[in-house]
Image (tube, helix red, strand yellow):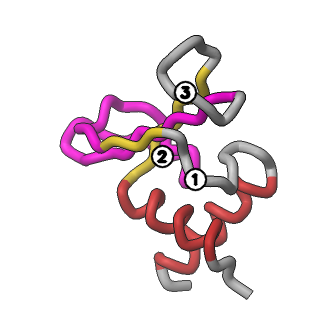
Amino acid sequence: MPDEIRLREQARAAIQTGTILSRAADRTWGVPGVGAECVVCQKPITKDQMEFEIEFAHDGKNPGVNPPLHLLHLHVRCFEAWEFERNEPLQ
């Protein structure tokens, strides 16, 4: 199975289980990996890799102000798979 299809299937599963939301994140930024587990593929994001950190405010407003916030870590390719899957799910 091509890697992109597998990642999109994993992203879809993460959306379906509620591990990650299907709406756009309130904040997104890229940083060097910190060893956190990717919410899509469940593999660590190593320090030699870039990651996207995405943040969801529980009320959908004012990220970064008045927590609680939900912060997730994704590999760049896993982030892309999630973006595709939440916008144009595989059939």
Please give the name of the residue rendered at 80% of the width and 49% of the height, measured from the top-left corner.
17
What residue sits right under mark 2 in the picture? Answer: 43
- Considering depth in this image, is 39 or 24 the residue closer to the camera? 24
Q: Is residue 47 left or right of residue 17?
A: left
Q: From mark 2 to mark 3, how far is it between C-alphas?
A: 30 Å
x and y percent of residue 15 in the render? 72, 55
Q: From mark 1 to mark 2, how far is it between C-alphas?
A: 22 Å
34 w.r.t. 83: above or below = above
Q: Earlier in the sequence, mark 2 or mark 3?
A: 2
Please give the name of the residue rendered at 49% of the width and 44% of the height, measured from the top-left corner.
38
What count of labels does the image hold? 3
What residue sits right under mark 3 in the picture? Answer: 62
Q: Earlier in the sequence, mark 1 or mark 2?
A: 1
| Residue furthest out toward the left | 48
x and y percent of residue 18 in the render? 77, 45
Circle 1 or circle 2, nearest the eye: 1
What residue sits right under mark 1 in the picture? Answer: 24
Q: Is residue 77 left or right of residue 81?
A: left
| Residue furthest out toward the right | 17
Q: Which residues are magenta?
A: 30-58
The image quarter in which residue 68 lies? top right
Residue 69, magenta (yes or no): no
